[in-house]
Image (spheres, rainbow, N blue to C red):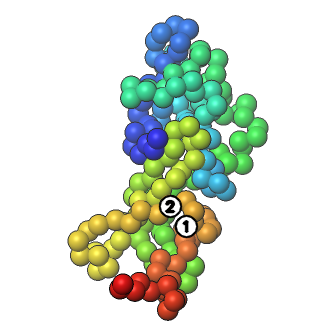
């Protein structure tokens, strides 16, 4: 099941042990190398100024009201997550990134994305085109299989409309 980025944040982290909220999710941590949501930055309920990280593998279930975890112990301080240090330093956010094709054609900017709940991989990018390219104000949906490269400033995708070979044209029977 896919979930939009806005539905990933501003939710409570709920403890099974205490049956109470223990934190609130602020924003996702996204690995730009494979577009995986590795975890979430959270604000601790007990220590208001403390920012902790909830790793995706510690989430037992995702409900409309929040994320279910075993206990407060699954929340980790940023400095404890050595394996994620490089990804945390990149601080990747797909929303707002320019989208271009391999041939250099500007497509638009990412306005939203949808992630798959079970695997936590981003599956779709929603790209809004400039008004001069699309008068109807619609957006494009880019599947993760169309993404060719991700740089710090843009996302490069395969060309949108490649020429169709002559033998592939439809024939009327």
Furthest residue toward front? 173
Q: Which residue is mark 1?
A: 146
Query: Image height check: is 160 above or below 50?
Result: below
Q: CA distance from mark 1 to mark 2?
A: 6 Å
Dot 1 and dot 2 residues touching (CB under 8 Å) = yes
Furthest residue toward bottom? 166
Q: Residue at x 55, y 59 (%)?
A: 144
- Residue 73, given in percent of the width and then of the height, sits at 64, 17
Q: Which residue is mark 2?
A: 143
Query: Image height check: is 99 above or below 119?
Result: below
Furthest residue toward top? 18
Few, some or many residues within 10 Å of mark 2 (<14, 14–19, 20+)? some
Q: From where the camera sits, is residue 24 visible? A: no
Q: From where the camera sits, is residue 67 visible? A: yes
Q: Residue at x 47, y 77 (%)?
A: 160
Disc 1 element: helix
Q: Please state which of residues 155 and 152 is positioned toward the viewer in this rendering.
A: 155
Disc 2 element: strand
Q: Quadrant of the C terminus?
A: bottom left
């Amino acid at each position: 099941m896919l979930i939009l980025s806005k539905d990933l944040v501003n939710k409570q982290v709920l403890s099974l042990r205490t049956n109470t909220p223990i934190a609130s999710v602020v924003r996702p941590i996204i690995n730009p190398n494979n577009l995986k949501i590795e975890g979430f930055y959270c604000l601790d309920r007990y220590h208001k100024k403390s920012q902790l990280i909830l790793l995706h593998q510690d989430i037992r279930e995702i409900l409309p009201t929040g994320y279910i975890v075993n206990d407060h112990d699954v929340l980790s301080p940023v400095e404890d997550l050595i394996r994620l240090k490089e990804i945390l330093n990149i601080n990747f956010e797909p929303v707002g990134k320019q989208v271009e094709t391999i041939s250099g054609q500007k497509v638009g900017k990412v306005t939203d994305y949808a992630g798959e709940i079970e695997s936590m991989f981003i599956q779709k990018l929603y790209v809004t085109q400039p008004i001069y390219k699309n008068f109807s104000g619609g957006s494009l949906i880019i599947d993760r299989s169309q993404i060719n490269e991700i740089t710090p400033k843009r996302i490069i995708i395969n060309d949108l409309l490649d020429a169709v070979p002559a033998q592939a044209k439809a024939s009327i029977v």
